[in-house]
Amino acid sequence: MYQWGIIVLACLLSGNAYAGVAVSPKPYVLYRIGHFPITNGMLYTWIISAAIIILMRLFIKNPQMVPNKRQLVVEGIIESIYSLVEPIVGKRVMGQAFPLLIGFFIYILIQNWSSLLPGVGTIGFYQGNHFTYFFRPSNADLNATLALAAIAMLAWGYFVVKNEGLKGTLLHIFGNKADRSELSFGIYTFLFFIFLAVGFIECISILFRLISLSFRLYGNVFGGENLINNIMALAPWAKFLVPIPFYFLEILIGAVQAFVFTLLVAVYIGSICNHEEAHE
C-alpha cells in the first residue's frame, strides 16, 4: 500500500534536494482519468503553455502603430527570426509557414528555459521509497518532442503539397534532374533510374527526420537535467554556487536547440518550396 505524503522539497532558492539520483527517462504517472494517464511532463507542459499565452497577452494587449517597450521586445524577436528564415523558406511560402516557425521557436525556447525554474524535479511525494516529482520539463519527455516533430513533418507535407502540388513534389523527389537537351537518350535513361533510386533514399531520410528532430531536442534537455542533478550531488556543501555556470550553459543550450529545431523545419520546407528562388 502506497504511503502518500506530500513533501515540499524546494523553495525559491533551493537546489535539487533529491540530487544524485539519475533523472528517469520516462515521465511519472500522477493520475489517471479512466485509462488516460496524466504524467508530470504533461502537467508541467500545460502550466508553461498557459503561462506563455497569459504573458503574451499581457505583453501585447492592444498592438499599437507606435509600439511600447513590451511590444518592441516581442516584435524584435519576431523580426529577427523572420529575417533569418525568409531566405531559407522563400518569400512565396514565408507568409504561410512563419506563424508555425515562430511558434516553434518561442514555445521550445520557453519550455527549455522553464526546466531551470525552482521546484522542477524537486517537489513531489513518496510512494514507498520512491520519489515522484510533480514537474518534469516538457522537452525532457520523449513523448512531447515526438509530438513536436510529428507536427513539424505534417506541416512540412502540407506546405509542400499546397505550393508544389503532388506531381511537383514527386518530381522533385524522384524526377530526373538532368537536362535532356544536353545528354544522349541512353545516358538520360540511365540517370532516370539513378535519380529514382536516390528518391527512395530521400524518402527514408524524410522519415528519419521525425526521429532526428525529436531525439536531438529530447537528448539535450534530458542530458542537461541529469548534468545539473549530478553536479549538485558532487558538491552538496555548495549546491547553491557550483551549478551556476551550468545553469548558464543550459540557458545557452536551450536557446540553441530552439533555434536549431526551427531552422531545420525551415530548411525542410525551403528545400522543395524554395528551390526555384534559390536557383535564381
Image (cartoon, rainbow, N blue to C red):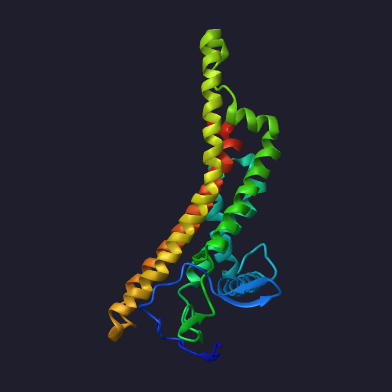
**The N terminus, quarter of image:** bottom right
Pick the front one: 218 or 164: 218
Residue 263, image x, y percentages: 51, 49
Q: Is residue 195 left or right of residue 67?
A: left
Residue at 56% x, 62% y: name it.
143
Residue at 58% x, 61% y: name it.
75
**The C terminus, quarter of image:** top right
Residue, far front: 1
Res. 89 visible in picture: no
Asked where in the image residue 203 lies, by quadrant, the reply is: top right
Residue at 48% x, 61% y: name it.
218
Residue 67, image x, y percentages: 62, 65
Up-down relation of residue 96 to residue 258 (above or below): above
Pick the front one: 53 or 132: 132
Give the total of numbered labels.
0
Residue at 63% x, 27% y: name it.
171
Residue 179, image x, y percentages: 55, 16
Res. 219 visible in picture: yes
Up-down relation of residue 207 to residue 73 (above or below): above
Residue 69, image x, y percentages: 57, 70
Pick the front one: 276 or 59: 276
